[in-house]
Amino acid sequence: MSVEQRDVIDFCSIRPDGRAALTISDHLPWLADSNHLVILQDKLNAYLTVVESGQIFDAYPQARGREIEIQILCKYPPLPEALQFLDRAGQTIRSAGLHFSWRVLGSESGAVV
């Protein structure tokens, strides 16, 4: 599963803090001329739809009654344009009442909110 499979939840888990985490596995490099941001935005929108429609509870019943977090695990460090996108995406996701985080695999850097 990966960011390119728009209609698939890559991973679901329960975090140690009790949140249900829906994880996007983003293996794509951040190239200036790629459509990486469009692919990621489509995937995030699909995750939001699954949560807002309640379908998440059918697919992952353990999420019921828990706070939901959408997290992105990136293989490569984001470029500045991607960092701006991730900040805006986080604001949108938080405004929907969810938590958002991202990080680069093998790194503690990223944003958690």
Image (spheres, rainbow, N blue to C red):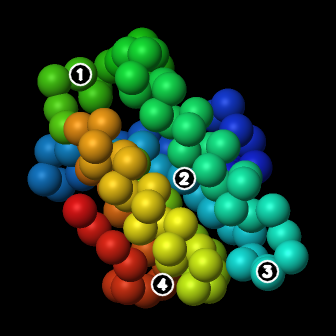
Give 35 or 61, whichever is nearer the viewer.
35
For image coordinates 34% across by 55% down, the residue present is 91
- Going by the numbered disc 4, the residue's amino acid type is Gly
Report the residue marked by disc 3. 31
Report the residue marked by disc 1. 64
- Going by the numbered disc 2, the residue's amino acid type is Ile
Report the residue marked by disc 2. 24
Q: Do callouts 4 and 2 mark residues in contact (Cβ within 8 Å)? A: no
Where is residue 62 shown, x and y percent of the image?
28, 26
Task: Give the CA distance from mark 4 to mark 2.
Answer: 16 Å
Local secondary structure at mark 2 = strand
For image coordinates 21% across by 44% down, the residue present is 19
Q: Is residue 80 visible?
A: yes
Local secondary structure at mark 3 = loop
For image coordinates 46% across by 34% down, the residue present is 48
Quadrant, the C terminus? bottom left
Q: In the displayed structure, would residue 79 be above or below residue 89?
A: below
Q: Is residue 68 visible?
A: no
**Left or right: 29, with 11 as reference point:** right
Q: Earlier in the sequence, mark 1 or mark 2?
A: 2
Task: Give the CA distance from mark 4 to mark 3.
Answer: 20 Å
Q: Earlier in the sequence, mark 4 or mark 2?
A: 2
